[in-house]
Amino acid sequence: MIDRYSLSPIKELWEDDYRFNKMLEIEIKVCEKLCKDGVIPIKDFENIKKKASIDIKDIQRKESTCRHETIAFIQSVSEKIGESSKYFHFGLTSSDVLDTALSLVMRDSLEIILKNTDRLRKEVLKKAKRYSEVVILGRTHGMHAEPTTVGLKFLIWVYQLERDIERLKSSLEIISYGKISGSVGTYAQIKPSIEKYVCKELGLKSPKISTQILQRDRHAQYLFSLSMLGNTFEKIATEIRHLHRTEIGELFEPFEENQKGSSSMPHKRNPILSERICGLSRVLRGNCLVGMENIPLWHERDMSHSSAERIVLADSTCLTHFMLNDMLFIIKNMSISKENIKKNLELSKGKIFSQSLMLKLVSKGMEKERAYDLVQKVSFESEDFLKSIQKISVVNEYLSKNDLEEIFNYGYYTKHVEEIFKRFEKE
């Protein structure tokens, strides 16, 4: 069974230890290139590389007095390095290190989310194939429409998840950029070749241009792709919630041993996981709006984005992963009631075949408007649609018994299902 409550390793990527170690890795790569360029003596670089380390508590203590996170980081590391520390953070500005480290965290996070989203897609596809021929009521406006299949319902979700994966891949590309260009992006104190070298070493790309920061449309797209994935989760969860209802009872999210549905009503089996997903998707969309509002900053940079994105980037990432775990658990362990599906199909006593009947009458020579009105009148006034239709003389003038048997047949609605599934044969 999936441990849907475990956020590891996503949560770890957003903790101070991981981030500060990425910042240190960036600083050392800059020193490495400066050493190659002859700016830092080899002896000093080796000393920096050997002695530089992260002490989170020390950084926090220093920040409590200097009120500047990056300076606290630099001071803490420099004390461990000693005299060679004069070359540490040489020619850099805080955002060179902060933004590049953030890109690494976001990249590593998206790779995990991409992997698990593809895992979810495969699980949904398995369910789609398993129930590909199970006929179920299609519903539009919440009302009985024509029959479809359970498998096709799942296949719609598969296709949407494929688009989510493409959006996540695009965001992975957009966010996989570093920035080592100095205080306003002019490379005045640090050469462009250093940025290129450091980014390549870290598996990132160099932007064509930056200011003091990487532009925040990248981060907004990251949040957008997560919120769109959350929308897909909500779409799936909403369908499950509807089909889970007492009067429908066709599909149920898992209900674990010893689980309780209500503090007052022992009979309740509520779709709480699906409801939770629907609620959390709203948080993702709200965070996405914050990301959009972080794009227009003053001149070469202000700090209005920083405080907000420290919340929304970490929260949205961990929240998406949490929802992924919930969704995987639901899909793998859901139950489907074929008995209730069959009962609901027969609830309208044949009315769901109305379009097939109308079109058959038209194909046999009846005017379409007349056929529509006739079929509508019978469907509205009769309790047993098929029996009532068989008693109408004008219908019998146009249609034979074999025609009616062909019309009132679920197989008529599933004849192209195999063709649709073949479009997903790559799996």
Image (spheres, grey):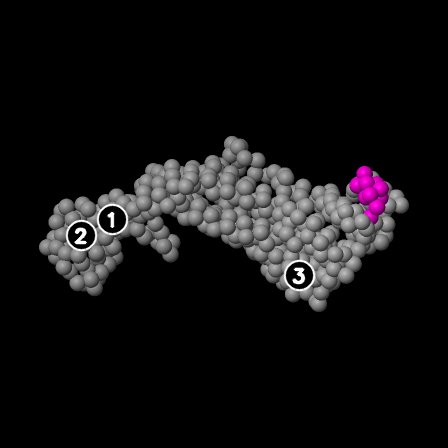
- Residue 253: tell me if it is visible: no
Check if mark 1's residue and mark 3's residue have beta carbons within 8 Å: no
Quarter of the figure that contains the C terminus: top left
Q: Position of residue 8 (x, y in %)?
A: 63, 39
Q: Residue at x 62, y 47 (%)?
A: 107
Say few, some or many: other residues with alpha carbon within 10 Å of mark 1 (under 14 / 14 to 19 / 20 or more).
Answer: some
Q: Residue 209, labelled with which disc?
A: 3
Of marks 3 and 2, the one in the foreground = 3
Say few, some or many: other residues with alpha carbon within 10 Å of mark 2 (under 14 / 14 to 19 / 20 or more).
Answer: many
What element does badge 2 sit on? helix
Residue picked out by circle 2 = 389
Check if mark 3's residue and mark 2's residue have beta carbons within 8 Å: no
Distance, label 3 to label 2, CA atoms, is: 72 Å
- What is the magenta segment's predominant secondary structure? helix
Q: Nearer the viewer, residue 196 or 282?
A: 196
Check if mark 1's residue and mark 2's residue have beta carbons within 8 Å: yes
Distance, label 1 to label 3, CA atoms, is: 65 Å
Q: Residue 350, labelled with which disc?
A: 1
Q: Amino acid at mark 2?
A: Ile
Q: Position of residue 43 (x, y in %)?
A: 84, 42
